[in-house]
Amino acid sequence: MLPLMAMGINLSKPAVFTWIEYISQNLWPQIILLWPCIFGVFGSYIFTRERIENTYKNLLIIPVGRIRLALAKLIVMFVSIIAMCSLTYVLNLSGILVGVPVDLASFLKGLQIYILSGGLMFLSILPVMLIAVLARKSFLLSVCISIVYALVSFLASWVAPLAALLPIDVTWRILDLKQFEMSYSFPMSVSYLSLAIISIVSLIGIFWAAQKQDA
């Protein structure tokens, strides 16, 4: 959708944009608003589906531990996010129709940016997955948390201390998207540390909750 919208915006002056500028223009609203909601809902469904449909006990018959089951779901989620980000990137090729220039080197560099953004979004969405595991059958709660999480991250973009610490805003900072001038209260090293701590704590919480919960 966003590449198509960008086509309409750039019809009058497509050659003004380089390929990287074009894909970056399409990337920032996905990171700040769309992807947190989409990936949060998708991941929540992965972690709550069996409990909602009351099939979790059937899974326990299979000789696979609960931690390994949670790990498998995380792997599926990671691969799916990377695949969705890659597909979104390919859709940017629609810009060629209105004259946005692209060469092989620029295309590969852009693909690298989108794959990196997918990996960072996976880490950023882990807190929502922790809530999904803790909420058990409350898929609606997880969906609401995903939306609130995206909105809070968007608003925090203009609050320097939060912009340097919240995972989604840190993703924006790491990718160095320059569509907006943003200020940060802490150096990049603190942002990396914040993302690492939140991700690790969320992973530990997911595995702990998966191990402790009853069917």
Image: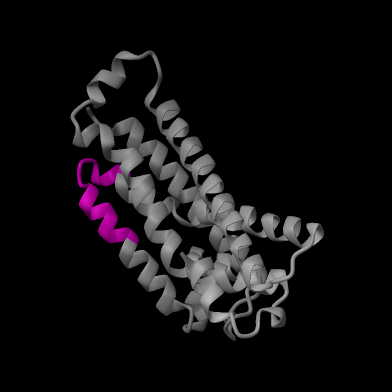
Is residue 3 something that shows in the picture? Answer: yes
- Residue pictured at 34% horizontal, 51% vertical: 41
On the image, the x and y values in percent for residue 190 come to: 61, 68
Q: Main SS of the magenta segment?
A: helix
- Residue pictured at 24% horizontal, 46% vertical: 135
On the image, the x and y values in percent for residue 173 come to: 61, 71
170 shown above or below 15: above
56 shown above or below 5: above
| Relative depth, front residue between 157 and 4 | 4
- Residue pictured at 41% horizontal, 37% vertical: 207
Q: Does the stretch in magenta take in 170? A: no
Left or right of residue 197, residue 64 in this image: left
Left or right of residue 50, residue 123 in this image: right
Q: Does the stretch in magenta take in 138? A: yes
Q: Which residues are magenta?
A: 133-146
Tell how many labels: 0
| Relative depth, front residue between 169 and 104 | 104
